[in-house]
Amino acid sequence: MALRNFRAPYYGWVIVAATSAALLFGAGIRVVPGAFLLDMVSDTGWSRASLSLAAGIGLLVYGFTGPAAGSLMVRIGSRRVATIALLVTAVALGLSSLVEEEWQLTLVFGLLSGIGTGMIASVLGAAVASRWFIRYRGLVVGIFGAASSAGQLLFYPLLSAMVEGSGWRSSALMLAAAAALLAIPVALLMRNDPSDIGLAPLGESAAERRVERTAEAGAMGRALKTPTFWLLAGTFFVCGFSSNGVVGQHFIAHAVDHGFTPGVAAEALALMGLFNFFGTIASGWLTDRIDPRKLLFVYYLFRGVSLLTLPAIHDSLGIVAFAVLFGIDYIATVPPTIALTADTFGGRNVGVVYGWIFASHMVGAAIAAWGAGVIRDDIGTYAPAFIGAAMLAGLASLAALMIRRPVIRAA
């Protein structure tokens, strides 16, 4: 009798687990340049500018792969896209360990790795959440955000320890093997849609879900004609510039310049990731209660002030304080940016419009990743890069207040 009454857990939670693992790994791979940079300079003799160029191209491709991956998921399904993405990432990492020329690193780690991780990062979580969940959708999106934060939290100290023990080439090979192994459970466990296994999205029928979530024809063309889209894209450009770009790629090298060991710097970044986890959840909670434009104003202003202090930090207390404060704000901009996108362009069109806003974020990250390396090579310090990022953050805080929020929320 007990077995007759037993109800298996909703399979969507298995999909959430597989997706979270893929997102965690993809986020971890994007921090590889920051963890590998110093050992790569020592091993190859290449300049920081050339190595940063490969990292910058990877971030750029990572951002612009998202919209294309979204279209590909519609055609061949999220399971195949996620599996292919992990295999492409594995090939890119394996080839990176063998490079002997700078252009080879730019090609395989910049271009190929950017494609692999970009196919996962920006749209996989959104596709899974919208297809499988009506009830608990916000919780699922939060889990995916936490997985991305955990990628940084876990991978920075892990990669630093791997590099210290085995060098960057052996570490890249180990990561390649991990990506290939992760592709196996993703291929076996992922499903494209609840209807594939006779289910409906949790909390709503499949028919109702399809009507609600189908994007309007021409939505992106209309968005491009509005000032709001460009303000959101512009502020998110600054978000990428000041977070993933200058801090994510160069924080460890900057800290070493200021007398810290790479291990201490990696631990500070891990602490940053931990507080980023809580900061993003808190930002989502606040976005439901406070005008998102005001939140963005505060976040960007706070980020600018934090970055202004970084060049002056030379002690352990200072670097820990920066990691905590900047970590709280690291991707706190995401929930209000998505909310404003939905308010302005409609919930059905968030995937399309936000995909391109996210691409702008990664353009900013790519420019900062490359530019900071050039500045460090030319004048011997990262200070102008951080100060420039701080000034841009101040401008973004003002731009956020210029966004017009519709009185009536679009469908």
Image: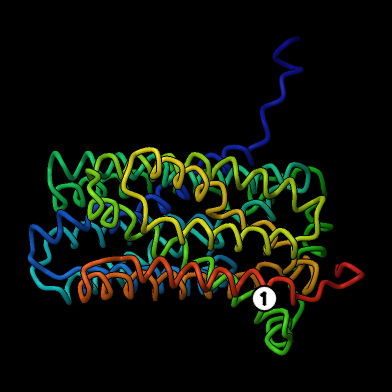
Mark 1, other Cα within 10 Å: few <14 / some 14–19 / many ≥20: some
Q: Residue at x 58, y 70 (%)?
A: 394
Q: Is residue 320 above or below residue 193?
A: above
Give the image location of residue 353, x and y in percent.
66, 74
- Residue 108 shown left or right of residue 320 in the figure: left
Residue placed furthest toward the top: 1
Where residue 248 appears, as percent x and y from the top left, is: 39, 57
Left or right placement of residue 55 versus residue 19 in this view: left
> Which residue corresponds to the image point at 27% horizontal and 44% vertical from the top-left?
159
Q: Point out residue 399 in the picture as x, y percentages from the top left corner.
A: 67, 75
Compare residues 33 and 397 and report the one nearer the observer: 397
Find disc 1 in the rendering and name its residue: 399
Q: Is residue 341 rendered to the left or right of residue 105?
A: right
Q: Is residue 36 visible?
A: yes
In this rendering, the answer to whether 302 lies above or below 197 is: below
Q: Residue at x 61, y 76 (%)?
A: 233
In the picture, residue 103 is in which quadrant? Answer: bottom left
